[in-house]
Image: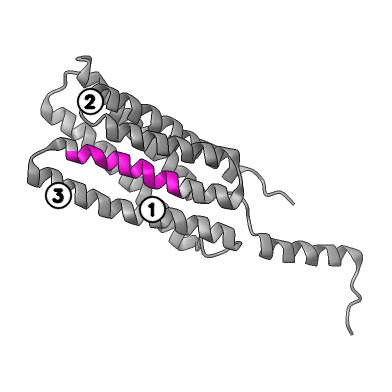
Amino acid sequence: MTKKPTAQSAEADLAFLRSIVEGDPRPPMTLAICYLAGGLLYGIQCLFHLGQVLGLVRWPDLASLIFVVGITVAFLAILTWAILTDRKSGAGQRGPSSSRTLNAAFSATGMTNAAVVIIFAVGAIRDGDFSIWLYYAAIVFALQAAAWYVSWLIRKKGWMLATALGGWATAVALGVLVREPFWYLVVCTMALFLLFALPGWHMFRLARAPREG
């Protein structure tokens, strides 16, 4: 015997179909955590280097090296956890095409960053010029600006456009200030907190919010 459909069951079916088509508009929690952690950790590292430039931090070389390496190790640990969580949950493979496009944009940016690290690191070591390495941060912000601009084109959120424009301006400023250590660190510190940690915190709040509808 076939059960007669009711208005309530019809509404439930429509809601289910809508969830398939629209997906979950909230940002991935792992992406939010990576931005938040990266902005905070590397922002603190830049503050540490600013303290060194100003003579406020006078740690032994070994202690400074341990601190810097510790920042990177902490971030890589968080990044590894995020990747494994994504793989386990299948994040980025579900949801609407817009969400998959955003995930692809940021994944491609991360892959490009890895290549840029190798290119600039080899160039700096080969030429014995540390300033070559400093251009790496400018390229990172330029790539992030591109990813956020794609995000804005898809989602049309004002904060995404602001982050994209801020990343573009930061990339140009860092490229110009490579030979000015103090101002380079000032710009980089502010950008890490405002363009990485702040969007990360905003995404974290959005990811934790209950789903609408």
Mark 2 element type: helix
Left or right: residue 18 compared with residue 83: right
Label 3: few (<14), some or many (≥20) within 10 Å? Answer: some
* Sequence-first disc among 1 and 3: 1
Label 1 and label 3: CA atoms lie apart by 20 Å
**From the viewer's perspective, is residue 106 above or below residue 135?**
below
Magenta segment main secondary structure: helix
Q: Which mark is residue 192?
A: none
Label 1: few (<14), some or many (≥20) within 10 Å? Answer: some
Left or right: residue 157 compared with residue 213: left
Residue lying furthest bottom in this view?
A: 1
Magenta range = 132-146
Queried whether the magenta region covers residue 138, the answer comes back as yes
The residue at which mark 3 appears reads as 122
Q: Are marks 2 and 3 in contact (CB under 8 Å)?
A: no
The residue at which mark 1 appears reads as 109
* Sequence-first disc among 2 and 3: 3
The residue at which mark 2 appears reads as 181
Is residue 45 at all visible to an observer of this figure? Answer: yes
Q: On the image, which quarter does residue 159 sit in?
A: top right
Where residue 83 appears, x then y in whole percent? 40, 56
Mark 1 element type: helix
Label 1 and label 2: CA atoms lie apart by 26 Å
Q: Residue at x 14, y 49 (%)?
A: 122
Where residue 16 appears, x then y in whole percent? 73, 64
Q: Amino acid at mark 2?
A: Pro
